[in-house]
Image (tube, rainbow, N blue to C red):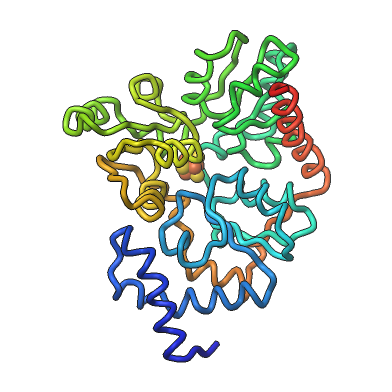
Amino acid sequence: MKFTPDQFEKETDRLYDELQKAGWSREDCLLITPLTLEINALKKKQDAIILAHSYQTPDIMYGVADFIGDSYGLARKAMEMDCKKIIFCSVHFMGETAKLLNPAKEVLVPSVAGCSLAASITPEDVRKLRERHPDAGVVCYVNTTAAVKAESDASCTSANVVQIIDAMPQDEIIFIPDKLMGINMKKLTKKKIHLWEGTCIVHERFDEEAVKAIREQYPNAKILAHTECNSAIVDSVDMAGSTSQMVKYIAESSDKEFMLVTECGLTDRIKVEQPTKKIVGTCNLCPYMKEISLKNVLKALKNPSDDQKIEISEDIAEKAKKSLDRMFELEKSSSL
Ligand code: SF4
């Protein structure tokens, strides 16, 4: 594709306007301009939308994405969009969730990135857990494969986990696969909970002593943690919740300094979208999320490989969709 010098100039200005807030120079922006121009032109031509999880890098989020958010929120957003194709910049299971909710649209992921949490459990493991606890209902966190969702009674997000568990008809629940989130949630429900040993490698690495040190160094900073962190951290912070709840908390807060105990992409997102707020402390990178690049986004649009295309067998898709629909129903009925 050919672009005029004027188009290059305008696109570099547009990128620099946003990305400088995340520390990018104009030269950095100039280097990615040919890619963002081509991706955005192809996106229009192919009637595609690009979704970016909040753990993506700023060039993806502000260079080419139409929407930024968490996986379930983005998959639902895509349902409202009149488009033929979805490019989901995230890990593989998130692409599957988008496909389950948008079966008539073509869904592609730029990289076949895995996830330590989703990989921790198989459908066979879920069947064995059911045999061991025959009276329990199974609730799975959305960070699971479609095949695992298909074996579960209901799905849940980090924002509604307690609400869904409390709304389930059983008094005993098998919660999969995130052990740390399960330990945090257990304190908030009266139900008997059986946990699985899965963890997110990004959030399990945070250490409460490091968070304490930041608290001492920045006594005015509000500290926010994802509920996939260990309970010593979750119990000690000012707010614990999902990525979208953290974004909302900071936007509505009159405080000026924050530490985010989560993936670095969210820190970049706050820097760009809420530039008057100061982010202190450290974050951790998700190596799976960071497999996405502008180059593999372009490949997904231009010449996608089979493994970039999300395909789910009819049988699994039908059962997994039921687990997502059940979450929706339980959420609705328990808020009445
Ligand atoms: S941050 Fe990375 S490892 Fe953790 S749940 Fe998300 S994709 Fe998986």
| Displayed quadrant of residue 166 | top right
Picture layout, residue 174 above or below residue 227 = above
Which residue is at 57% across, 29% downward?
177
Spot occupied by residue 172 in the image (x, y as percentages of width and height): 67, 11
Quadrant containing the N terminus in the rendered view: bottom right
Spot occupied by residue 65 in the image (x, y as percentages of width and height): 53, 62
Q: Nearer the viewer, residue 106 or 257?
A: 257
Q: Is residue 100 left or right of residue 11?
A: right
Picture layout, residue 131 above or below residue 214 = above
Spot occupied by residue 331 in the image (x, y as percentages of width and height): 69, 28
Q: Nearer the viewer, residue 289 or 147?
A: 289
Q: Is residue 197 left or right of residue 96?
A: left
Which residue is at 35% across, 77% downward?
30
Q: Is residue 187 left or right of residue 79?
A: left
Q: Residue furthest left?
A: 217
| Displayed quadrant of residue 125 | top right
